[in-house]
Image (cartoon, rainbow, N blue to C red):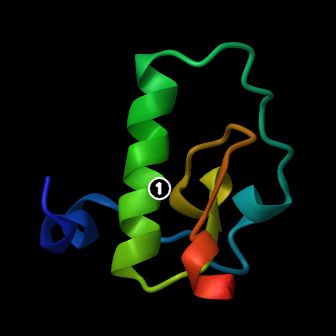
Amino acid sequence: MHATDIKSLITLVIHPDPRLKTKSEEIKAVDDEVRNNLERMAMAMDYFRGIGLAGVQIGYMKQAFVMNYDAIR
């Protein structure tokens, strides 16, 4: 998937969406679903020029976070 396609697939969850105050579920095991969602999160973070992104910010209600380390060095 190209980064230009990501905007059509992911809408950012923004305030005052109640999901932002909902506790996300713990990830018990890393499987293909988790890997795919982490990849989607990283692509969304890059597309929207973010430094970090939590799962809830794309509607993935798991305790997941991606960060662009190079952006903060």
Q: Is residue 4 above or below residue 36?
A: below
Residue placed under numbered mark 1 in the picture:
41
Q: Is residue 33 visible?
A: yes
- Residue at image location 74% in from the left, 15% down from the top: 28
* Label 1 packing within 10 angstroms: few (<14), some (14-19), many (20+): many
- Residue at image location 38% in from the left, 51% down from the top: 40
Question: 57 or 50: which is nearer to us?
Answer: 50
Residue 37 rendering spot, x and y as whole percentages: 45, 40
Question: 22 or 30: which is nearer to us?
Answer: 30
Residue 42 rendering spot, x and y as whole percentages: 45, 59
Q: Is residue 31 left or right of residue 17?
A: left
- Residue at image location 60% in from the left, 79% down from the top: 51
Q: Is residue 35 left or right of residue 57?
A: left
Mark 1 element type: helix
Residue 39 rendering spot, x and y as whole percentages: 40, 46
Q: Quadrant of residue 25?
A: top right
- Residue at image location 86% in from the left, 44% down from the top: 23
Question: 44 or 11: which is nearer to us?
Answer: 44
Q: Is residue 11 visible?
A: no
Q: Is residue 31 above or below residue 4?
A: above
Q: Quadrant of residue 35?
A: top left
Residue 47 rendering spot, x and y as whole percentages: 34, 77
Q: Is residue 14 above or below residue 11?
A: below
Question: 62 or 15: which is nearer to us?
Answer: 62
Q: Count all numbered tags in the image, as a single digit.
A: 1
Q: Quadrant of residue 6?
A: bottom left
Which quadrant is home to the C terminus? bottom right
Amino acid on which disc 1 is placed: Met
Q: Is residue 47 left or right of residue 57?
A: left
